[in-house]
Amino acid sequence: MRRLGGWPIVGVAAAAVAVVLAADVAMLGAGEPGIRFALRATARMALVPFLAAFVASSAARTWPGPATRWMLANRRYLGVSFAVIHLVHGAAILTFAMLYAAEFRANEPLAIIVLGGLGYVFVLALLATSFDRTAAWLGPRRWARLHTTGIYYLWTIFFVTYAPQIGRGPVQAAATLLLVGAMGLRLATRRPAVALSAGPRVGAA
C-alpha cells in the first residue's frame, strides 16, 4: 500500500481536527466544557506533528530506515500540519478569552499571554515561509535562521506548558519526556553548519 505523503498529510491533519471538534461539540456543547476540551485536544494533537518535524533530520541520521526517511521527506508537511492544528488551538484560546474574559485574565498572567502571542508570530512566520516562493524571497541564510529560532522557541513554549504539570497525569508526563528526548536527540546529532540546499521545511535545523 502506498504510504501517505506530501500535502495530503496536511489534509488528514485538518480533517482529524475537524472530526475531534465536531465530536466535542456534539458531546459537550459549545459552552465552557466544550471549549476547554478543544483547548486540551488541539494542544496535544499539535504536539505530534511538531515533534515529528522537530526530530526528522536527527532521527533519519540516527536510525536510517523507511519510517525516518518518510519523516525527513515530509518534514515540510508535518510542520504545516502542526501550524494548522496550532492555529485552531489559537482560535480556541481567543474564543475562551472573549466568552470568559474575567476567568481568562485571572488564570493567564500577562507574561504568559505575551510569550504565547510571540509563539503564534513564529508559527505564522514559519508557515508563510514553508513554500518555495516565499523561502526563495527570504533567502537561504535568513530562512534557516528564522526556522531554527522559531522551532526552538516553540519547543520552549511546549516545554514550559507541560513540564510544570508533569505530576498531574500521564499525558503531561509523557509530553514532557518526549520533549526532553526530542531536544536531546537534536543536540546529540546537531551539525556545525546548516545545509542551505535542504529546501523550505518547518522544523528544519
Image (cartoon, rainbow, N blue to C red):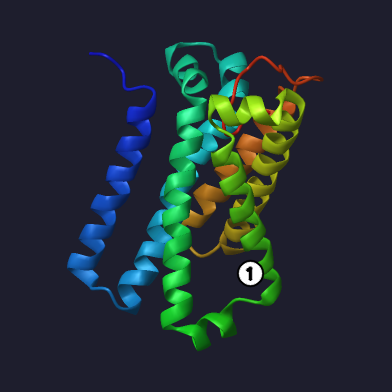
Image location (x, y in percent) of residue 78: 46, 33
Identify the residue shown where x is 46% and y is 23%.
74
Q: Going by the image, does 103 lie left or right of 134?
A: left
Q: Going by the image, does 176 lie left or right of 26?
A: right
Q: Which residue is mark 1?
A: 113
Residue farthest toward the top in the current orientation of the protein: 65
Report the quarter where the N terminus lies: top left
Image location (x, y in percent) of residue 27: 19, 68
104 over 198 or under it: above or below? below
Q: Nearer the viewer, residue 20 or 121?
A: 121
Q: Secondary structure at mark 1?
A: helix
Q: How many marks?
A: 1
Callout 1: few (<14), some (14-19), or many (20+) C-alpha neighbours within 10 Å? few
Q: Which residue type carries mark 1? A: Ile
Visible in this render: residue 204?
no
Q: Nearer the viewer, residue 169 or 157?
A: 157
Residue farthest toward the left in the current orientation of the protein: 26
Quadrant of residue 205 within the rendered picture: top right
Identify the residue shown where x is 47% and y is 51%.
86
Residue farthest toward the bottom in the current orientation of the protein: 102
